[in-house]
Image (cartoon, rainbow, N blue to C red):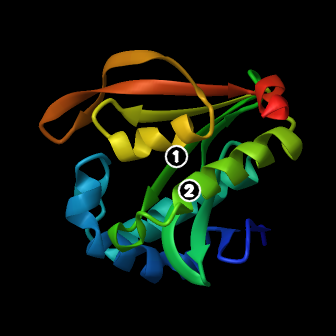
Amino acid sequence: MFIHKIDDELSLKLIEVNDRDNIFELTERSREHLRQWLPWLDTTTKVEDTESYINMSLQGFIEGKSLQTVILFHGQAVGVAGFNQINRANQTAYIGYWLAKDYQGNGIMTRVAKALTDYAFTELKLNKVEIRAAVENTKSRAVPERLGFVQEGTIRQAEWLYDHYVDTVVYGMLATEWKKS
């Protein structure tokens, strides 16, 4: 099992089927909050939907195409983060994340994204890490900005969120830049 200790408060562990109830419950408690920025809430309505996501994530991990982890804060599951896609041909990983509403404001996601970025460069030997966030999602955008990612551009109407399109900002970090920071 993959476990990555970040600090005394935080760890990342490979998402597993036995996490389904905890992750679904977190989703339920933060549904309205998460729905503002994530397109999958309306199709995740029962614990079996979360289990399907976990099985798909595990298959991606086995194939080396993704890595989804449960964020553990003081041993409690508080969200999900990882590489939504690992592109070996281009040596790039794309970080995605969500955090339960009750745990925001503790610096959790910045530390998680920093650990994932470091892991991408030191362990996976990738060249680039990207983080994408909706233009108006200032909390999510603050994460790569705090870590020194470069704002590379905006993709217009990049994502359909239930009843409207949102523009997405692309942030990038190169391995050579990370080593200097």
Q: Secondary structure at mark 1?
A: strand
Toward the viewer: 68 or 5?
Answer: 5
The residue identified by callout 2 is 81
Q: Quadrant of the N terminus?
A: bottom right
Q: Quadrant of residue 59?
A: bottom right
* Res. 96 mark: 1
10 Å neighbourhood of mark 2: few (<14), some, or many (≥20)? many
Which amino acid lies under the numbered mark 2 shown in the image of this protein?
Answer: Ala
Which amino acid lies under the numbered mark 1 shown in the image of this protein?
Answer: Gly
Q: Identify the residue at horizontal 62%, vertical 49% (top origin).
A: 113
125 displayed left or right of 178: right
Query: Is residue 111 shown above or below 90?
Result: below
10 Å neighbourhood of mark 1: few (<14), some, or many (≥20)? some
Q: Quadrant of residue 9?
A: bottom right
145 displayed left or right of 175: left
Q: Identify the residue at horizontal 56%, vertical 63% (top origin).
A: 55
| Marks 2 and 1 in Cβ contact (< 8 Å) | yes
Q: Compare marks 2 and 1 and give the one earlier in the sequence.
A: 2
Residue 11, how many percent across, how many down?
68, 71
Residue 101, how many percent across, how many down?
33, 67
Toward the viewer: 97 or 66?
Answer: 97
Query: Is residue 171 shown above or below 112?
Result: above
Q: Quadrant of the C terminus?
A: top right
Toward the viewer: 168 or 146?
Answer: 146
Q: Identify the residue at horizontal 62%, vertical 32% (top origin).
A: 148
Q: Secondary structure at mark 2?
A: strand
